[in-house]
Image: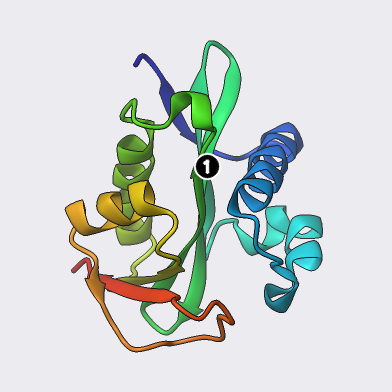
């Protein structure tokens, strides 16, 4: 699949990222209010921005079809958030490209490891995380899903 991966910079980029993240929340079918989701949507361009993070986007034919957020979690530790590719483009390699660029950005920002939380129902994403070397860890944050999965990858 021919696609372009880029880092959100403009207000419009963050508007497009917000659309993808809202689509992600609907796809997930889980109430994300426990993560202050509405505040996150309001502050995307702050929460996922240089110098501590970024929003990696995927575009096909001028349309943003995927995103993954990089944000500071703790000293030397980044968190991968809101990884999503719209269903029509899942399985096309876009998720893989998003993760590759995510890691490049995380290394450039000086992070030593990346954490994430997910749920078993997102089996495609879970396979992708494992493919990229994420390993299971103990819970590092609140996630009320009874089968939440927590993972981490050392990147330097």
Residue shown at 75% from the left, 72% from the top? 33
Q: Residue at x 65, y 56 (%)?
A: 29
Q: Residue furthest top?
A: 61
Whole-percent x, y for residue 45 in the image: 70, 53
Left or right side of 149 for 13: right
Determine the residue positioned at 41% across, 19% down. Answer: 3
In the rendered image, the vertical position of residue 58 relative to residue 137, given as above or below:
above
Quadrant of the image occupied by residue 148: bottom left
The quarter holding residue 94 reads top left
* Position of 110 relative to 75 (above/below): above
Where in the figure is residue 115, as x and y percent of width and height?
37, 72
Q: Going by the image, does 97 lie left or right of 25?
A: left
x and y, in percent, of residue 132 in the image = 21, 54
Out of 34 and 67, give the one closest to the viewer: 34
Q: Quadrant of the C terminus?
A: bottom left
Q: Which residue is mark 1?
A: 67
Q: How many other residues sit within 10 Å of disc 1, few (<14), some (14-19) or many (≥20)? A: many
Image quarter of the N terminus? top left
Q: Is residue 75 left or right of residue 130?
A: right
């Amino acid at each position: 699949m021919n696609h372009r991966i880029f880092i959100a910079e403009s207000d419009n980029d963050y508007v497009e990222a917000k659309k993808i993240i809202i689509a992600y929340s609907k796809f997930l079918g889980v109430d994300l209010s426990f993560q202050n989701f509405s505040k996150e949507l309001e502050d995307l361009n702050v929460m996922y921005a240089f110098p501590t993070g970024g929003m990696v986007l995927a575009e096909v034919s001028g349309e943003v079809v995927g995103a993954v957020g990089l944000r500071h979690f703790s000293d030397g530790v980044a968190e991968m958030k809101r990884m999503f590719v719209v269903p029509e483009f899942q399985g096309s390699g876009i998720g893989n490209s998003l993760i590759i660029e995510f890691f490049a950005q995380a290394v450039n920002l000086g992070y030593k490891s990346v954490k994430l939380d997910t749920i078993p129902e997102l089996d495609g994403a879970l396979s992708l995380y494992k493919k990229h070397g994420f390993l299971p860890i103990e819970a590092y944050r609140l996630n009320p899903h009874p089968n939440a999965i927590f993972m981490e990858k050392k990147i330097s």
